[in-house]
Image (spheres, rainbow, N blue to C red):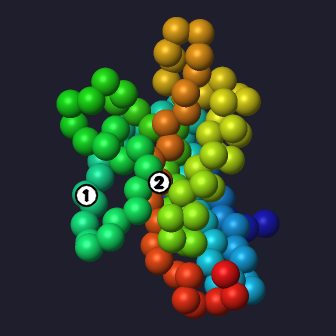
Amino acid sequence: MLRTPPNAITALPGILVGHASDYAAWTGCTVVLCEAGAVVGVDVRGPAPGTRETDLARPGHLVERAQAVLLAGGSAFGLAAADGVMQYLEGRGKGYRAGRAVVPIVPAAILFDLDVGDG
């Protein structure tokens, strides 16, 4: 049985981490789930950042918690991976309550890796 190191992020109660890789394209994505929600922060830099919902992670906005954070390859195409994370969380009723709707908050960022593999 694998043991979680005591200093790993998954050692925190309620935190789950998932990863998927495409070895032909040499890309992938990693998601950190906190279904109960967590206060997140962001610092976006670089000449061509690719992000989604990261403005919600800045102080002073209505939405104070995110249910997940996604990091993906695939350049701008990688942002679509957040759709699957949102569906997963919505199916479990996790997210920001907006009337009768539940909107999972999933800030995401990508990196450019299109010229690395077959992708």
Whole-angstrom CA distance, mark 2 to mark 1, is 12 Å
Seen at 36% across and 28% down, the residue is: 63
Q: Position of residue 55 (x, y in %)?
A: 31, 43
Which of disc 1 and disc 2 is earlier in sequence?
A: 1
Seen at 70% across and 39% down, the residue is: 88
In the shown orientation, is residue 23 left or right of residue 94?
A: right
Residue type of the residue flagged with mark 1: Asp
Seen at 55% across and 89% down, the residue is: 115
Q: Which of the numbered marks, if any, corresponds to residue 43? A: 1
Q: Which residue is mark 2?
A: 108
Which of the pair 11/50 is nearer the observer? 50
Q: Secondary structure at mark 1?
A: loop
In the shown orientation, is residue 17 left or right of residue 7?
A: right
Seen at 55% across and 33% down, the residue is: 104
Q: Secondary structure at mark 2?
A: strand
Which of the pair 105/46 is nearer the observer? 46
Specify the farthest residue to the right. 1
Is residue 15 visible in the rendered image? The answer is no
Circle 1 residues within 10 Å: few <14, some 14–19, many ≥20: few
Q: Position of residue 41 (x, y in %)?
A: 30, 48
Which of the pair 50/40 is nearer the observer? 50
Q: Position of residue 103 (x, y in %)?
A: 55, 27
Circle 2 residues within 10 Å: few <14, some 14–19, many ≥20: many
Residue type of the residue flagged with mark 2: Ala
